[in-house]
Image (tube, helix red, strand yellow):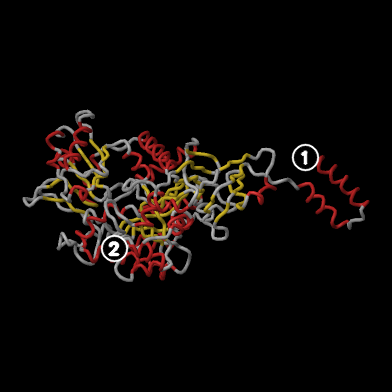
Amino acid sequence: MNRYTFLSATLVLAIAVLSLNIPPQDWLSLGLKRLSTKKLAADLIVKNAVIFTSDASLPVADSMAIQNGRILRVGNYSSLQDLVGGGTKELNVEGKVLVPGFIDSHVHLIPGGLQMGRVELRGVNQKEEFVRRVKEAAGNVKQGSWVLGGGWNNDLWGGELPMASWLDDFTADNPVWLTRMDGHMGLANSLALKLAGINNSSIDPSGGTIAKSTHGEPTGLLIDAAMKLVLPSIPEVSVDERREAFLRASNLALTRGVTTVVDFGRYFPGASVEHSWEDLSDVYQWADSSGKMIIRVCLFFPMETWSRLLELIKKTGRALSDWIYLGGVKAFADGSLGSNSAFFFEPYADEPHNYGLQVTDPESLFNMTAASDKLGLQVAIHAIGDRANEMVLEMYRSVALTNGMRDRRFRIEHAQHLAPGMAARFGEQGVVASVQPDHLHDDADSAAKKLGVDRAQQGSYLFHSLLASNARLALGSDWPVANINPVGSIKTAIQRIPHGWKNAWMSSECLSLNDALIAHTISAAYACFLDSELGSLSPGKLADFVILSTSTLDDLAEGSVTVEATYVAGVQAYP
């Protein structure tokens, strides 16, 4: 409206008001109110659904109105009729279950996408099949090219660890590097060891182990920080390869109903801290500026680079866009159970002199945590063994006392094995437990061997105990360590029946369906400070939601449900 139209309208209104004897002081307010009145209309109304909102104020509804990618109102269909306009479209869900877009609280997005194009060893349960897949891959690359892959789990074929000698006969001209499924151990063939300068006289780096035979010869296995000895010899992944990996990974996420991920990137023990920053500029910001973002990402960066992240947040704020959020910083306290490098109070049952590894120097870890927290950065630390979890909890307590009370939402990634009474400390200290239910499938058969039956039964994957202590539970996959699949993760959290088992692994630690859904939606959003924007189907929030292939929520507990459609900002993104 230009000023001439405004003045003319105001004059007409004034004449009308005078004729009605309305007091002069009310003229202008009445005129502005009438001139600004405009019918609020939705772009899309979703109806005939069983909506699980993850919002305690209205847990279930059947319809939802959306405008400009955000939710206008949730309720029953008749309560939304005043939002229908000429351009409003309707989506009839035909009685299907609709849930908020799933948030995967722990992924490595680009590594997952890269792994999709490499030697896939996940699920291999025989040594012969392991060797066959690597041999096939080696036969398809040029002489001198690296053979890369991962996902192997030696526990699936009885526990025997692979060795370079398994591969050397057919890879004499091709260096090989294959990471274990947990990312804390890798296998190099003899040529890769030679290129990395690893030999009988090589000594273990701090926070890592070079596995050697009884004769002192490297077997090819490198654990945690020792992996950094071979990684520099592997050619850098090109920008185009990383971009393609990101797009593959994003599309896979949508097929599984994941609309937001908390991404810890290519950072793991032994890897360069620069990778996360290169991917921010080369991949994420590129995708954002070119309109290729199709899922939302909350990025965490290596804790060693906390000051760089702080400077970036000062310039841009935490939200680079509706697609990219700057989450915080991450560090490692220990390794993994499968690699016998998770840090415990008691030694491993199968290695009586091994208590695991402290991957990061404790004093350095404390100093970086204190500095990051003091300046307002969210901190997430990987801890799997009970001693590592105790160390991180105690460090968090000390830092909070030193830096003062505030809403900091410290995170422990995995929180996998806890000593008696430790679960209660998560709630007492307000520490988020970022856990991955599907990991219990990989650990169920080996945990008793590595820890002993009592330790494995009493302290592993204490989901219910954590919730009972009022801890915030955020579910994720750790993809590509486990599949990115919230529907499967929810089933695992509810049933806790490992593959091949008939009964639950500690049924007392099973979650309810409601708790599992909350932990994959609003609690997951809370765990990364995005609960004002995401995580529930509430008015004002971004309209990310998933339509499932069932008309009853109870089917989710059985895991027979599939994702029929995924919507991001009210727009269908899959299929």
Circle 1 residues within 10 Å: few <14, some 14–19, many ≥20: few
Q: Which is in the foreground here, disc 1 or disc 2?
A: 2
Write down the residue under mark 2: 388
Task: Provide residue 254's location: percent of width, then percent of height.
Answer: 44, 42
- Say whether residue 337 is visible: yes
Instruction: In this rendered view, identify the residue nearer to me: 141 or 128.
Output: 128
Q: Dot 2 lies on which element?
A: helix
Q: Spatial distance from mark 1 to mark 2, Cα to Cα?
A: 66 Å
Q: Earlier in the sequence, mark 1 or mark 2?
A: 1
Mark number, residue 2: 1
- Kind of residue sitting beneath label 2: Ala
Q: Are marks 1 and 2 in contact (CB under 8 Å)?
A: no
Q: Residue furthest left?
A: 215
Viewer-proximal residue, 516 or 388?
516
User: Is 313 above or below relative to 230?
Assistant: below
Residue 370 lies, in percent from the top left, at 38, 63
Is disc 1 placed on a helix, strand or loop?
Answer: loop
Residue 92 quadrant: top right
Picture coordinates of residue 227, whole percent (x, y): 23, 48
Image quadrant where residue 563 sits: top left
Judge whether residue 315 can be spotted in this image.
Answer: no
Give the image location of residue 465, x and y in percent.
37, 66
The one of 398 and 434 positioned closer to us in this rendering: 434
**Relative to residue 396, is residue 419 drawn left or right?**
left
Judge left or right: residue 395 versus residue 81. Answer: left
Identify which residue, 367 or 240, lies in the foreground. 240
